[in-house]
Image (cartoon, grey):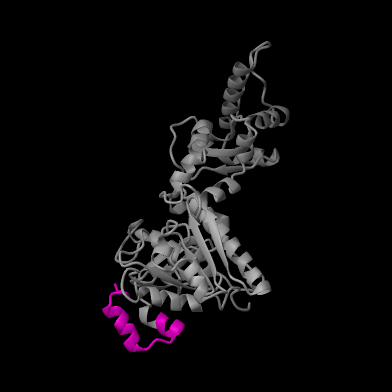
Amino acid sequence: MTDFPLAGLKVLDFSRVVAGPYATRMLSDLGAEVLKVEPPEGDVTRKLGKIDQGVSGYYLQLNIGKKNICVDLRAEGARDLIHRLAEQADIVVENFRPGVMDKFGIGWADLSRSNPRLVMLSISGYGQNSPERGRAAYAPVLHAEGGIIARQAEMGGGKPTDMQFAMADSYSSLHGIIAILTALRVLDQTGEGQHIDLAMVNVLHSADDYAHFALDDIWPKAPETLVWDAPEARQILITGDMKWLWIMFSTKDGLQDPTPQGADVPTKVRLRMEAMERHIRSYDSFDALTAALDRLNLAWGEVFPFGPEVYEQPSVRANGVVVDVTDDEGNPRRTIQSPYRFANMKSGIDADSKTAKRGEHNVAALRDWLDMDEQEISALAESKALVSQ
């Protein structure tokens, strides 16, 4: 294998929590040098998840492999420092509310004057120029307003509750990467940098494969992809709507229709559902059930409890989804590997990767990026623009 595909790119990362940090983590795994600019109070995810002597698992998963400087943007000298770093950067990523970077004099208009070739990604809830640009927008807010929470409750028949997955954040990170790579392509062709205004509300609706139901106003939809009680006190998810499952079970697996002649539709649906529930539980074993589903070409998945056993499944182990690393205190930890696998290029993190303390690379990064001498670095520390943990 040769080098990492994004080797040589420099990323200045102001982002925090998920939308942004996941994008820059993946850029780092692809070989870019990511310099995280963390405020003195730290990224809030440092306090989320399991914390032993070292950093939290949440922060580790989203930030491992990045270098770190700690800058107080309110302090004297901080603005000039960021401008100098931006001059050396290829990419800047931030997910403040619109206007925050401008307030500190480090928004797109300011930084692009320092570096016309700069590609800058700004992730926000509603967009840089929308009427709701100033609203706080974490992923659950977008899930609620996008109809996803209500849809899940309707489909599952339960109380409305947010999914335990920051989908709006994660998808925004991934679309952010696509936009960055596209802008770099344009840069190669024109020599001009780009500012990318990525609104999470746009991303969520763009990625929602159910959007057409709402746009065509044909909701509600018949239940599909249900979870069933299975033999051996296990549970199984079977994809496909109920009508298709009924056709497969009744025409190819011997299930008899219990519906009396002349029954109305609600009665027919209820009786057939109950018959399928009994049929699925009737197999001698879980393996016998899954063998039948495979024969019927029905896709299925066992419902596993959320825990370490999820990562012991055959394909998870074979694909190297989990990687052993160390945290900022040198403690052994496990985290998730990036998913990219190239024929002739490297990607991902290895056991030498670690998470950085706040300000761990203040000196090394400023010497490397800016060729700063000790006197300049000391002056920034004295003005409190540069902070060490």
Q: Main secondary structure of the magenta part?
A: helix
Q: Which quadrant would the C terminus be assigned to in this image?
A: bottom left
Residue 381 in magenta stretch: yes
Residue placed furthest toward the left: 382
* Foreground pick, 210 / 267: 210
The x, y position of residue 322, in whole percent, is 49, 62
- In the image, what residue occupies the spot 28% across and 75% down? 384
Q: Which residues are magenta?
A: 365-389
**Quarter the N terminus occupies:** bottom right
Q: Residue 342: give x, y in percent of width and height.
A: 64, 69
Residue 60, picture quadrant: bottom left
Residue 6 as seen in the image, left or right of residue 58: right
Q: Quadrant of residue 96?
A: bottom left
Left/right of residue 232 with respect to residue 249 in the rendered view: left
Q: Position of residue 185 (x, y in %)?
A: 65, 69
Does 298 appear in magenta? no
Residue 344 in sight here: no
Q: Position of residue 115 (x, y in %)?
A: 53, 76
Nearer to us in this view, 99 or 215: 99
Q: Please determine whether, in this image, residue 224 is positioned above or below residue 170.
A: above
Q: Nearer the viewer, residue 56 or 376?
A: 376
Q: Residue at x 32, y 68 (%)?
A: 74
Q: Residue at x 59, y 41 (%)?
A: 287
